[in-house]
Image (cartoon, grey):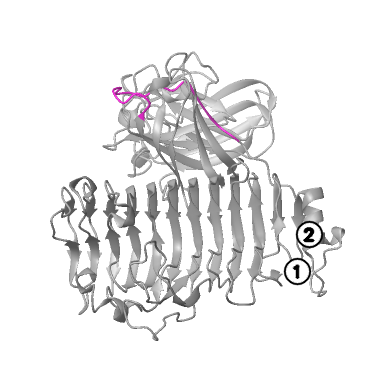
Amino acid sequence: MYGEISITTSTAVPEWVYDLGTIQTIASVSFWSWGAMHGISQMPSGDIRIYAASALGGPYSEIAAVTRSMIRDTVPPNSQATDGEGFRIPCSGPAGRYLKIRVTTPDSMGGLDNVWRLRLVSINEPIVVHGFQDASGDSDVNDFPRIPYNIVDGALDTMWNPLRTDLRLVLDLGPLPRRFQTITFQPNAGDGAFLPQKGEVRVSSNDDPDNMDLIVGLFDIGWADKANDPATIILPKVFEKRFVEVHWTSVREPTYTQTRIAEVAVDTVPAAPSGVSAASCAALPDDGIDDAVALQTCLDQYHHVLLSAGTYNLGAALKLPSDSSLTGQGINITFLQLTVDKVAIRVLGNSRVRMSGFNVNRPFDASAQEAIFVRADNGNYPTYIEVDHVRVTNNRSRAPAIALHDVTNGSITDSDVYDSQRLMTNEPYPSTPDPYPGQTFSFVFGNGVQVISGSNIYLASNTIVETRDMRDTSHVPPNGAYYQASGIVVSASRNVVVRANYVERTGTNLDTSGSQDLYLDGNALFDCHDVCIKLVNGSSRITLHANMIWRAGLAGVWLATGNTGLSATYNNLDDNDFHEIGQGYGQGFWAPYLWWAVVGIALDKADSVDNAVRFNTIQNNDFYANAYMREAVFEHPGPVAPSDNIFYNNNIH
């Protein structure tokens, strides 16, 4: 840390030198402003150049050059950078003991009233507080002198004390992107009740701190010692980014009106082990031999196994141990071909497991098995599970293609499921007592991705598509081809992000039955047989944002008590698009007897007042009318109709 500097002239070219004490490699230089309530505080602006030298007299080598406007941008939280924020300049060049900073300021970029007053300058900071804002977009939130620098100064006896409990905080982990998964806030002794408790984490698709557009995790942090325990956020998977935004909406003690943080730390996750070639265990592709035993031996002995290009035959399930990975060359390059009706990959109660870069294919119909199945076993619950760039094809099964059960801290990303549905005919109705004795039905089973009783899960950029028309016309509705299959199921789970997935031609595209605290963002949902998104059986505190819904056979979104009688409450449907409602491929099945539900958003009636669909917000949605959609938003009348819901600024085109 190097001390305060104040510049009040607009005529000279400001230039100053710091003595670092020893010759050092300078990876970055950070500038920190004073906090609010300290008069005027303004960052350097204009053309900023940084030089390093081994001797005070030089020669100096330029190691960084940037241009920065007085008001850096118009996007909070970084609009003025005068309330205690910092900004980092990455550097590259020879090491040095003396650090020279020169600022040339054009008139259009001058300091505020020609006054620059920096709190300090520092080098090679692990973390820089890049920006922050409260719910109104204001960054004037600090209780001076408890400024943001205090949470990265390595001292627990200092703190940052923003006078808010709803705050967005952007951290710069640079100067290069960092692999991280955990963010920890430390309290001063006895101040733990002021720490963040509930909120979300975002990163940027282009690593721009003014474009934190990707939500990657939700958190609701527990504690044993409310006054002294740190608040640790664990993300569902490792992300590699320079900037991360933490937005907390509450602190541990709900009656408090401010936040207090002594230190913040972000972990650095090392690169995954490279692994051992499967060939070293005599598992060779394309040789026509069953490779299951050799691959299992390799996994048990080395834990991290690399698959080559080609096809490996599996006559038994692979069981992945803890601290293991199975990595192929790509979903169009490496294939795992099932030769028997078995699960391809099992993870039974094990943790820290990664699967990536291969295609699992089941070349026969009428299965009852998953392709990838992760679940608890003997009281051991799997955690830190990652499925990335995996494809499952032809898993025509009653079971889901990829299933995560009882998983904490898990992710399925950039993966595909093609053709996972199975038609079963002449089946009795699957409930007791049977409401239709003597009748038989056709059912379509086979979810694409299924998460049950999960927590802290991330499902992003996946594709689930059925290419075969599974309708059975041999039965007359309502008996014919009732769809149980869904593209994505998130059931009885919490803190799950479902983002940017593509789902086409399933029963329900996205089913959230019995889940709470989900964020469904930017998903493209096409051609569902019945309802594209279900919020049922107690689904609550779920946000649907910027999803595109096309060709629902019935309703685009359905809020209902479901078969459990639990209400759908406190959900937020915002900025979603609805197209061709009622024109999905289940149109002919539903129209004769559920014609009233061919709507954009349906809020169903309930059996009792306690179970009414209530306290939901439906706003800023766009509905594109057609000859089939009866209404954009429909509240079902009845003895216990929906109530206390908010409808605002929804548009029909």
Which disc number belongs to residue 295? 2
Where on the picture, by quarter, is residue 23? top right
Where does the image place residue 408, in percent across and percent down from the top left?
53, 43
Number of disc labels: 2
For the C terminus, the quadrant is bottom left
Q: Where is 618 relative to 120, above or below?
A: below
Name the side, left or right, on which 123 lies relative to 581: right
Q: Amino acid at mark 2?
A: Leu
Q: Amino acid at mark 1?
A: Tyr
Where does the image place residue 208, in percent across and percent down from the top left?
46, 47
Q: Residue at x 70, y 52 (%)?
A: 320
For the N terminus, the quadrant is top right
Which circle's residue, 1 or 2, is located before the other in the chain? 2
Q: Residue at x 19, y 66 (%)?
A: 632
Q: In 3D space, how far apart are the residues under numbered discs 1 and 2 (Cα atoms)?
A: 9 Å
Where on the picture, by quarter, is residue 582? bottom left
Which disc number belongs to residue 312? 1
- Mark 2 packing: few (<14 Cα in 10 Å), some, or many (20+)? many
